């Protein structure tokens, strides 16, 4: 660089004079001088290049940075006095200094927006259907054909999804049984038939409350964990690494979770049903002063095998919903840590929504059948 190079503002003007060549320190000085003039309220800054004998791409970059600094504050930089090769070089890079109006993004019409949403939903639906087919194949068909299954992973998932969740599932259903019994007793007391609280609790938990509440607890616990695990593996490119090693993602990751939750969900539902009935029993025997024999008689009299079967059938469907939604959202995540959080939240919301919708469908079917 030219040792005699310098950048200085002409006193009491909006002109910055450059001489020699633009070195790193001089380039920074140029940007500072231009920003200082703009901050004083002057929108037009003139850069005098009459003292510059030579300029290269690095000097042009400093001039561009000075121009961009002015444009960010609504100002403008004009280059003056350039001669010879310097003028030719400035002409080559002049488009950088010309402020261009950014074209407004095209506005989407109503039908275009609806069509885009429909295509996105269709794409997501086809991905989910493909995941369901893969999960069923690698869980039930492939092992029969001798293509193997990660049984150790299945037992680990059973422990995590089932055994570790027993406490919270039992506690939630027990407390819900107490609440339902209290609310029912308050209403039935008016007619002097408080003993029918036992029938109401056992039927409610056998058909609806145990499986729905267990499904919501499992979706918030296990469904979120599945999504977070697979989403983290996706953003950290572990899924791509597995594919690169020739491993099938559905066989390696999805099938063990699919089998495990199909095993543990009905068991957790039965435990939730028992604890819900126990919650109602505690209220009836301890607070309503009914005898154990009388309460037990009305409980057994009210419930049927069909009532329990309804809850168990729903538990299998809810289990498939939880694992498919969790894996689907985990494998489709985009972005980093924020993407993982959004995918996890989305999975839990979708789990609860589809559980309620499926329960409504079952309730409609059983209403007309029974």
Image: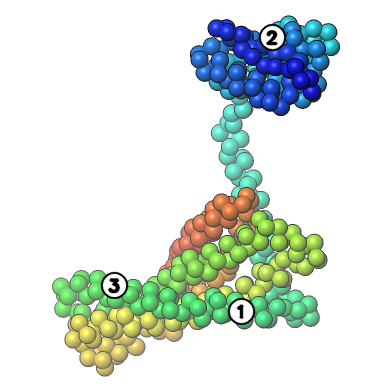
Q: Residue 29 appears at what percent x and percent y?
A: 64, 22
Determine contact: label 1, label 3, CB under 8 Å: no
Q: Secondary structure at mark 1?
A: helix
Task: Please tell me whether residue 2 is drawn above or below residue 265 in the rendered image.
Answer: above
Q: Secondary structure at mark 2?
A: strand
Measure the alpha-carbon separation of dots 2 and 3: 83 Å
Work out which quarter of the rendered image holds the C terminus and state it. Answer: bottom left
Task: Please tell me whether residue 125 is drawn above or below residue 213 in the rendered image.
Answer: above
Residue displayed at 76% across by 20% down:
3
Q: Residue 89 appears at what percent x and percent y?
A: 81, 15
Measure the alpha-carbon separation of dots 1 and 2: 74 Å
Q: Earlier in the sequence, mark 1 or mark 3?
A: 1
Front residue of this view, candidates 331 and 138: 331
Q: Is residue 172 left or right of residue 292?
A: right
Which residue occupies the extreme right position in the image?
Answer: 85
Q: Earlier in the sequence, mark 1 or mark 2?
A: 2
Q: Is residue 99 visible?
A: yes
Q: Secondary structure at mark 3?
A: helix
Q: Which residue is mark 2?
A: 48
Measure the alpha-carbon separation of dots 1 and 3: 34 Å
Residue displayed at 84% across by 11% down:
85
Q: Which residue is mark 3?
A: 179
Q: Which residue is mark 1?
A: 156
Q: Residue 162 appears at what percent x and percent y?
A: 52, 78
Task: Indicate which label's residue lies in the foreground, 1 or 3.
Answer: 1
The 10 Å Cα crowd at callout 1, few under 14, some 14 to 19, many 20 or more, is some
The 10 Å Cα crowd at callout 3, few under 14, some 14 to 19, many 20 or more, is some
Q: Residue 248 appears at what percent x and percent y?
A: 75, 67
The 10 Å Cα crowd at callout 2, few under 14, some 14 to 19, many 20 or more, is many
Q: Is residue 362 visible?
A: no
Q: Is residue 109 left or right of residue 239?
A: left
Q: Earlier in the sequence, mark 2 or mark 3?
A: 2
């Amino acid at each position: 660089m030219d040792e005699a190079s310098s950048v200085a503002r002409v006193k009491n003007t909006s002109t910055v004079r450059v001489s020699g060549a633009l070195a790193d320190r001089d380039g920074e000085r140029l940007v500072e001088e231009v920003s200082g003039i703009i901050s004083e309220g002057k929108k037009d800054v003139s850069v005098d290049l009459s003292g510059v004998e030579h300029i290269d791409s690095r000097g042009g970059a400093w001039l561009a940075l000075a121009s961009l600094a002015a444009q960010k504050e609504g100002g403008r930089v004009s280059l003056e006095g350039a001669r010879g090769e310097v003028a030719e070089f400035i002409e080559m890079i002049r488009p950088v200094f010309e402020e261009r109006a950014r074209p407004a993004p095209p506005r989407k019409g109503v039908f275009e927006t609806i069509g885009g949403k429909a295509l996105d939903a269709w794409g997501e639906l086809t991905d989910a259907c493909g995941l369901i087919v893969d999960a069923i194949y690698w869980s039930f068909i492939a092992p029969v054909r001798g293509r193997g299954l990660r049984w150790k992973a299945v037992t680990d998932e059973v422990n995590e999804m089932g055994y570790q969740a027993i406490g919270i599932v039992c506690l939630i259903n027990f407390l819900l049984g107490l609440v339902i019994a209290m609310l029912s007793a308050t209403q039935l007391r008016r007619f002097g038939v408080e003993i029918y609280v036992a029938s109401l609790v056992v039927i409610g938990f056998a058909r609806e409350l145990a499986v729905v509440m267990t499904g919501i607890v499992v979706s918030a616990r296990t469904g979120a964990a599945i999504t977070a695990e697979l989403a983290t593996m996706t953003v950290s490119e572990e899924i791509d690494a597995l594919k690169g090693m020739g491993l099938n993602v559905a066989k390696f990751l999805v099938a063990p979770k699919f089998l495990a939750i199909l095993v543990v969900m009905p068991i957790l539902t039965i435990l939730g049903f028992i604890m819900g009935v126990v919650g109602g029993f505690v209220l009836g025997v301890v607070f309503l002063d009914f005898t154990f024999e009388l309460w037990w008689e009305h409980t057994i009299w009210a419930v049927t095998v069909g009532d329990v079967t309804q809850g168990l059938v729903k538990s299998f469907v809810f289990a498939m919903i939880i694992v498919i939604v969790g894996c689907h959202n985990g494998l489709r995540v985009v972005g980093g840590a924020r993407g993982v959080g959004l995918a996890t939240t989305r999975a839990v919301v979708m789990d609860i929504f589809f559980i309620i919708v499926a329960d409504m469908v079952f309730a409609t079917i059983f209403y007309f059948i029974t």
